[in-house]
Image (cartoon, rainbow, N blue to C red):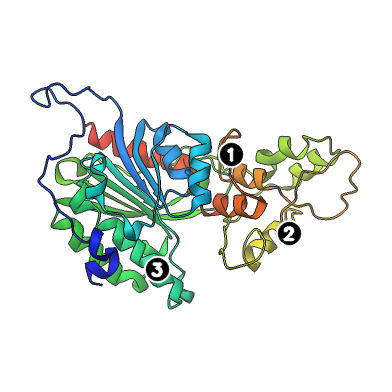
Amino acid sequence: MDRAAILGTRGAGRRRRAGSGGRRATADGDQGREPVNKLRFVDVCAGAGGLALGLEEAGFEPALLLDKKRIACETLRLNRPEWNVLEMDLLDFDPSEHRHTYDVDLLSAGLPRVKSSATVARTETEEELRLLEAAVLLAPSIQPRALIIENVPGLVDSPKFEDTREFIRKELEHLGYRFRWFVLNAADFGVPQDRKQGVLVALKEQYFDAFVPPAPTVTEHLPVGRALRRSMGARGWPGADAWAAQAIGVAPTLVGGSDNRGGADLGPTGSKKAWERMRVNGGALANAVPGPDDNVSGMIKLTDAQAACLQSFPEEWRFAGKKTARYRQIGHASPPPVGKALGMAVATALNS
């Protein structure tokens, strides 16, 4: 795909002199600049901030977070008013108008999911692949030392995405990056959810050999019942312990769904059947957890706050908008513990 078609006339291939923006002070130059201890990153398609929050926990600080959806930007500002949040479509973003993004340590992108191989011909996928390619095409201008791009597992090795992987390879190799594709499961990092994520990590040549993909941080997956027992009993529902005791598996992958669809639910048919086995009605969300006088004889519904717990967002992280809008942000997010693990692995390589 032609670069101008991806980025438009403004963002297409804008280059600048290497070193024209400062990352941080060094021992033998950049005199008069304030030293900065933390690694800096730019996060595009930031959504509700799951990846950015994980990177923050890994010791990074954002130079810019970009998302085209107003509700996502409201969520970011609600939780981190000090963050530099820009409401803009990635396809319209021109780094030359935001020169503080030059030479950051990391460019990260938790992009909208490309469709599975069964639906890859759908027109929505063209937009999602354009965003993926646009994120890669920021590298010549921003010149980050590392990139993290997170999407569906099929992007790693599916023949359907071979052309996309080849495009990425050519773009990154001629800029001096080496890279690695791999798949992570959020459940291996303490998230109570079976959520596989395809990941691309690229680093400048001198840092690549020090990079090791994150290893699992837990030896036992966290079941849904244990993750939600306290919240399920928060209003005094007497059946909370019994419900938690039988919800012994991890959650199926939460899906945020499309803005073109109706209300929020917990995913496609296969996911709903998995929820049924844990006595959860996956067809809708509740406004509140059951109370002491609620007669819950069948399946229960989860709240959007409980969905956020299943994504391992901290309790204090708030989501802007009404219930459906909140849930869609949650379902589309990258779980913060995965972002933290990736950030720590990249930081180790950059500091080696």
Front one among 322 and 180: 322
Which residue is depicted at the point 8% across and 24% down?
Answer: 28
Could you classify mark 1 by the number of other residues whose Cα lies within 10 Å: few (under 14), some (14-19), or many (20 or more)? some
Which residue is depicted at the point 28% across and 71% down?
Answer: 163
* Left or right of residue 173, residue 94 in this image: right
Closer to the observer: label 2 or label 1?
A: 1
Q: Which sits earlier in the primary sequence, circle 2 or circle 1?
A: 2
The alpha-carbon separation of the residues under discs 3 and 2 comes to 34 Å
Is residue 178 at least partly visible in the picture? no
Residue under label 3: 127
The alpha-carbon separation of the residues under discs 3 and 1 comes to 29 Å
Q: Which sits earlier in the primary sequence, circle 3 or circle 2?
A: 3
Label 2: element kind:
helix
Label 3: element kind:
helix
Disc sitting over residue 318 in the figure: 1
The alpha-carbon separation of the residues under discs 2 and 1 comes to 28 Å
Identified by mark 3, the residue type is Glu
Disc sitting over residue 97 in the figure: none
Closer to the observer: label 3 or label 2?
A: 3
> Which quadrant of the view contains residue 256?
bottom right
Q: Height in image: 20 above or below 115? A: above
Identified by mark 1, the residue type is Arg
Q: Which sits earlier in the primary sequence, circle 3 or circle 1?
A: 3
Front one among 244 and 307: 307
Could you classify mark 3 by the number of other residues whose Cα lies within 10 Å: few (under 14), some (14-19), or many (20 or more)? some
Residue under label 2: 276
